[in-house]
Amino acid sequence: MAKRRTRVKTEKTEKGIRVTCLIKHPMETGNRLGADGAKIPIHYIKFVDFGINGDHVGTINLGPGVSADPYLSMDIAGAVSGDKVSLHWEDSKGESDTVDTVVK
Amino acid sequence: MMKRRSFLQQTLAFTAGLVASGSGLFYMPRAYAARPDAAFIARDLDTVLKEILGGSEATMSDQIKLDAPLQAENGAVVPVVVSTTLEAPEAIAIVVPKNPTPLLSLLEATPRTGSYVRMRIKMAGTDEVRAYVKSGGQWYMAAQEVRVAVGGCGG
């Protein structure tokens, strides 16, 4: 299982933080043809879970129509400096990644 | 390079810890285990809306702000921002009716989230982007047309 890169950054907003992540992933729809003329199998991230200090605060479910290398942002209210932001995603082939960062 | 290595080591150590603890689940319990899988692979809008809205009608709302370009050069990367001032949003769905799989995303919110979500989506051609927001058990929506020069869904 190839390890994919997941990057997370946070920025302050009026009510908390905005978490942005960039996940390196092909997000294949299953509709595209490869160089050999055969269909490239469907392969996409199914969900990204967001947590603050171990508590689940939201999930973004994705379909295959999200652009390759998903670049997602979500606002989390009430988060402050020092909070631990966790992100966990899984894709349609069972690959996954988990990343933590601390709010500056 | 060193940074990446230590990152990988930490991740590995973390994963090993999880396995050792014998927990079959990852550390964050999901609020809703019911991801509507059928809706994400459904190829027609009716099925998607039935799965997501559960048969209810969505009302147009000016408390949903949908930010998308009026024209997109490249349908493979269309930035979309949905923000809402609706009270306690529970879910946000992003739908492109004419895409091969019309449901792009479903955000399951908790009391701390659901006011803002941003992503980049693929669009097969000129179409409207719809944002559905659930608040107080009711569904609301906003829509905007995006003119797409080159579609970004097929081969």
Image (tube, rainbow, N blue to C red):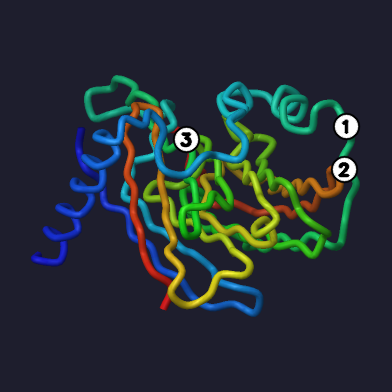
Quadrant position of the N terminus of chain B in the picture:
bottom left
Identify the amino acid type marked 2: Gln
Compared with A92, B134 (above or below) is: below
Find the residue positioned furthest to the left.
Answer: B2
What crowding class fits label 1: few (fewer than 14 Cα within 10 Å), some (14-19), or many (20 or more)?
A: few
**Which of the two residues, A21 or B24, is positioned nearer the viewer here?**
B24
Identify the amino acid type marked 1: Ser
Compared with B113, B154 (above or below) is: above
**Alpha-carbon distance for marks 3 and 1?**
25 Å
What crowding class fits label 2: few (fewer than 14 Cα within 10 Å), some (14-19), or many (20 or more)?
A: some
**To which residue does mark 3 refer?**
A46
Q: Secondary structure at mark 2?
A: strand
Residue for point 41% across, 46% down = A88
- Residue B125's quadrant in the figure? top right
Q: Secondary structure at mark 3?
A: strand
Identify the amino acid type marked 3: Lys
Compared with A40, B3 (above or below) is: below
- Residue B138 - label: 2
- Mark 2 near mark 1, Cβ–Cβ under 8 Å? yes
**Which of the two residues, B19 or B59, is positioned nearer the viewer here?**
B19
- Residue A41 - label: none
Compared with A103, A88 (above or below) is: above
Q: Position of residue A99 (x, y in %)?
A: 34, 54
**Which of the two residues, A30 or B138, is positioned nearer the viewer here?**
B138
**To which residue does mark 1 refer?**
B56
Residue under mark 1: which chain is it in?
Answer: B
**Alpha-carbon distance for marks 2 and 1?**
8 Å
**Which of the two residues, B122 or B147, is positioned nearer the viewer here?**
B122
